[in-house]
Image (tube, helix red, strand yellow):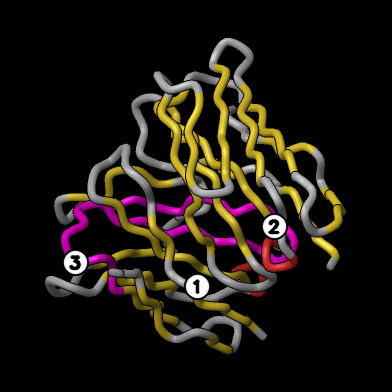
Amino acid sequence: SQQGEEDPQALSIQEGENATMNCSYKTSINNLQWYRQNSGRGLVHLILIRSNEREKHSGRLRVTLDTSKKSSSLLITASRAADTASYFCATLPSGYSTLTFGKGTMLLVSP
Amino acid sequence: EPEVTQTPSHQVTQMGQEVILRCVPISNHLYFYWYRQILGQKVEFLVSFYNNEISEKSEIFDDQFSVERPDGSNFTLKIRSTKLEDSAMYFCASSAGGTDTQYFGPGTRLTVL
């Protein structure tokens, strides 16, 4: 079955450092979306990358997609303490409109 | 900026009771969804809704669940007879198109005692 799995499960860095999170999936997709969730709160959409795109930027975020390897990465540059949250990738399988979420990466950014 | 809203933010109910969770999707969106997240687990898809009917549903979405769009703005999820294992955060989402960004609401935390 379709799965997005993030790696690492947890990441601890200092403010100013870059954070890289990876996501792997198993079947063909229409797009892949990254979300952020602060503890016990809602899901905030960060960026969507379509299957025919290889890289997208939004502010301090950079997302790559390699459909041949069925993987994506999210890079947060110059991290801030406010970036502390869980980050999820969610894949939209081809032919469907439902997202499949991974387990997420917990990012802790220390001042 | 338009956003998805959900009420209530927290609902506590007794096992066997019916609950209705409410959502107001973004006004010009055509696709609506419910997801849930059991504490410490993945976000799971429940159901999608388009053109006044269910378009997809998961195995979780059994006969105890139903969705409705009673008017032009609200989108509801009803659980007829709640079970302990229904305790979770329930998220509503909406999108303009079926392959577009899905915007999530803040969630309703359902606690079944």
* Residue picked out by circle 3: B27
Amino acid found under the numbered disc labelled 1: Gly
Q: In this rendering, would B7 be left or right of A72?
A: left
Residue lying furthest top: A68
Q: How many numbered tags mark residues here?
A: 3
Quarter the N terminus of chain B occupies: bottom left
Amino acid found under the numbered disc labelled 3: Ser
Q: Are marks 3 and 2 in contact (CB under 8 Å)?
A: no
Q: What crowding class fits label 2: few (fewer than 14 Cα within 10 Å), some (14-19), or many (20 or more)?
A: many
Q: Are marks 2 and 1 in contact (CB under 8 Å)?
A: no
Mark 1 or mark 3, whichever is nearer to me: 3
Q: In this rendering, would B91 be left or right of B75?
A: right
* Residue picked out by circle 2: A86
Q: CA distance from mark 3 to mark 2?
A: 28 Å
Tell me which label, 1 or 3, sits earlier in the chain.
3
Q: Nearer the viewer, residue A61 or B20?
A: A61
Q: Nearer the viewer, residue B16 or A27?
A: A27
Q: Which range is magenta?
A: B24-49
